[in-house]
Amino acid sequence: MGAPTFNQSKEIATLVKKLQPNCLISGRLWNDQGDFVVMGDNHKPNFKMGVPWQTPASMFRETWSYRSWQERPNVEDKIGEKIHDLITVVSLGGNYLLNIGPKGDGTIVPFEQQVIEEIGTWLHQNGEAIYGTTATPIDPQNWGFTTACEGKIYLHITNYPENNILTINGFNSTIQRAYLLTDSTVVFQNSTNKVGLEVDLTTLINRDKYATVIVLENDHELLYTPENAVYPDTEGAFVLTSENAIKLHSFSGHDYYSTKSTVIKNRWHLAGNTKELFEVNLAYLSKNKQPLQIRVNHKKLIIQTSNAENSVKNDLSNHTILNVTLMLNKTNVIELSFNDQSNQHRCLDIEELKITIK
């Protein structure tokens, strides 16, 4: 929690990597020398992250350690709070670190012990939907959250829909089977239509009081069109700007108090199309002259040497980049970032941007 100089942070990072190249360094080494971001205490991001990250949480927001006068609420409320925090963080792609404060003699307060044991019981039954899973492109829903592993999507239900119909707008995949994670004999009727996916929860009689997990088996890749997907204009061109981009963040700074969120990547979801070969034109204005890269469906296609010095406001120069192939009738993912990723926390800092794919 100190305020090291850049050289001090760099010296420690270099030493760690020399001794253990595969060690991940916490962002709290500061000066952008960490491999993963550590959020503020008990904080979760309210935006999408573009780097590995972690939420450090305490049993009580007032303290990290034991104190005899700590007010302890209903134990089931605290269990539910921490399980929901765990689900939220993992569904957003983060790691969850939970701290408890032992007493002076090393023993655990019975309240904290019960909370931890009940979280363990829930994980023993539902851990498949937590451990080894990844975030999905599906945004948090009014009924809960999603995680995924190969061939499976997990629906974490924390708020049950009143009509027993769980919906995911934009979900286009065909589901082979939907069932309760804790009892695979409990299956659910489901269907996809032009709007998305509907899962009928009528047969869900025994609901977990903290979070019920439903498994969707899907043998193929997840087909999902988010609400903010970009559609072609009347001339069949996709026009990508800062305004219709999804911003991916990190944190950059010198110490705990100066470190602020930064936009490190712009991402767009392009709705399915009937044309395959496109020409890409990039126009941007930036104070930073660093080369940029564009990825199409996570494959690097371009190393763009910056021509930003030739651009002026309201007169952005168009630069033909490359011909690219987009998948037909599927959502394509386009990403823009610095080509040099040696500092993955640095702000992209583009003042004006227009990418035309036509």
Image (cartoon, rainbow, N blue to C red):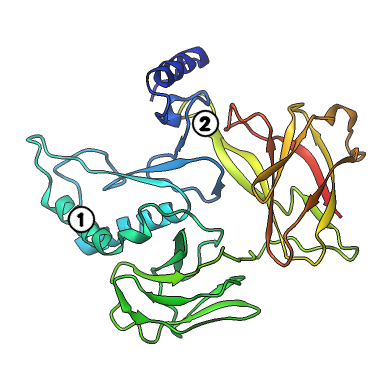
The residue to which callout 1 is attached is: 115
For mark 2, give the secondary structure.
Answer: loop
State the residue in front, 259 or 134: 134
The amino acid on which the numbered mark 2 sits, given as a three-letter code, is Thr
Q: Is residue 74 visible?
A: no
Q: Is residue 112 left or right of residue 245?
A: left
Give the vertical position of 66 relative to 23 (above or below). below
Q: Residue at x 72, y 64 (%)?
A: 271
Labels 2 and 1 touching (C-beta < 8 A)? no
Give the vertical position of 320 relative to 92 (above or below). above
Q: Residue at x 41, y 15 (%)?
A: 15
User: Mark 1 or mark 2, which is nearer the start of the sequence?
Assistant: 1
Give the vertical position of 152 relative to 326 (above or below). below
Residue 269 pos. (x, y %): 68, 57
Q: Residues within 10 Å of mark 1 (few under 14, many from 20)?
A: many
Q: Residue at x 13, y 43 (%)?
A: 68
For mark 1, give the secondary structure.
Answer: helix
Give the vertical position of 311 relative to 124 (above or below). above
Q: Is residue 139 left or right of residue 152?
A: right
The amino acid on which the numbered mark 1 sits, given as a three-letter code, is Val
Which is closer to the viewer, label 2 or label 1?
1
Q: Quadrant of residue 82?
A: bottom left
Q: Quadrant of residue 249?
A: top right
Q: Is residue 147 visible?
A: yes
The residue to which callout 2 is attached is: 259
Residue 326 pos. (x, y %): 75, 56
What's the mark number on residue 207?
none
Q: Quadrant of residue 17?
A: top left
Q: Residue at x 42, y 46 (%)?
A: 43
> In which quadrant is the C terminus drawn?
bottom right
Q: Residues within 10 Å of mark 2 (few under 14, many from 20)?
A: some
Q: Is residue 299 left or right of residue 80?
A: right
